[in-house]
Image: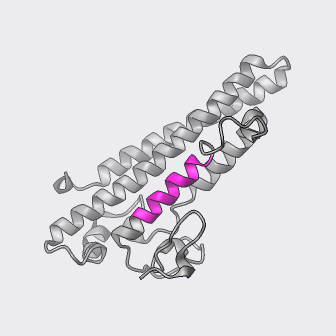
Amino acid sequence: MITEQTVFDPVTVDPMSPLTGDGRPYDRADSPFTSISAFIAASQVFFTAMQEALFHESCDCSPKRAPEARLCRLQTLLKKLQYMLDDLPAVMRQWVVAELGHQSRDEFDKNVDSPEVAHAQLEITRANLHFTHLWLQNYLLEKIDLILQQQVSDASVTSDTASASAALRANWASREDICRQMLHLLHSISASTY
C-alpha cells in the first residue's frame, strides 16, 4: 500500500525500499528487496543522471548556457550518481558474491513458483540496475568531456588548458574503471541466467 509519506515530488518510494533508509550504506539490516524496489532504484538513478537534460533548451537564462556552470552541475550530478546505490541490500550490490545471491534468491519475488526463475529475475534485475548506473556515469563523463575539450580548444591561457587536459585524463581513468566494473558485473552473472 502506498501512503502519502512515500510520495515525493519526483518519486514514489516503497516504504520497505532500502532507498528510504538512514543513508548509512552497510550499517543496517537488509530488508526485503522486491521488483518494485528495483524499479524505484533504477528510476531514481536515471532521473538523477538526466536532470541536466531536463533543463529547458530554449531558455537563454538557463545555467545550461554557461559552460562553467554546466560543467560544475554535471560534475555534481556525477558525484551524486556514483554513490547512489551504496544503500542497496547485499543481494543487489554490484560486487555481490555468488553464494549470497543463492541464499537470498527466494526473498526477491515470493510470487514466482520456481526458485530458479526467481534467482534469474534477481540476477537480471541486479545486472540491469548496475549497467544503467554505470552507463549513465559514462554518459555524464561524455558531457563533461565535451565541455572540457571545448575549453582546451578555446583556451588562450595555458593554465586553463593544462587543468582541462588533466581533467580529461582523469575522466579517461574513470571510464576505464567503469569498463572494469561492467566486465566484473558480466562475469558475476551465473551462466544459467542467460
Front residue (pair 165, 119): 119
Q: Is residue 190 left or right of residue 114?
A: right
In the rendered image, the vertical position of residue 16 relative to residue 177, given as above or below: below
Kindly identify the residue that appears in the image at 70 percent across and 23 percent down: 150
Residue extending furthest toward the left: 114
Can I make out residue 27 in this image? no
Q: Position of residue 154 (x, y in %)?
A: 77, 18
Q: Is residue 187 left or right of residue 114?
A: right
Q: Is residue 102 left or right of residue 32?
A: left
Residue extending furthest toward the right: 157
The color scheme shown is one colour
Q: Quadrant of residue 192?
A: bottom left
Q: Quadrant of residue 188?
A: bottom left
Q: Position of residue 143 (x, y in %)?
A: 60, 34
Q: Is residue 109 left or right of residue 78?
A: left
Can I make out residue 116 in this image? yes
Of helix, strand and loop, which mostly describes the magenta segment?
A: helix
In the rendered image, the vertical position of residue 65 relative to residue 53, given as above or below: above
Kindly identify the residue that appears in the image at 74 percent across and 24 percent down: 151
In the rendered image, the vertical position of residue 20 relative to residue 120, given as above or below: below
Q: Position of residue 99 (x, y in %)?
A: 28, 68
Kindly identify the residue that appears in the image at 65 percent across and 30 percent down: 168
Image quarter hosting the N terminus: bottom left
Kindly identify the residue that appears in the image at 60 percent across and 66 percent down: 9
Residue extending furthest toward the front: 58
Front residue (pair 121, 61): 61
Q: Is residue 176 magenta?
A: no
Q: Position of residue 40 (x, y in %)?
A: 45, 65
Q: Magenta stretch: give its range.
A: 39-51
Q: How many marks?
A: 0
Front residue (pair 17, 190): 17
Q: Is residue 41 magenta?
A: yes
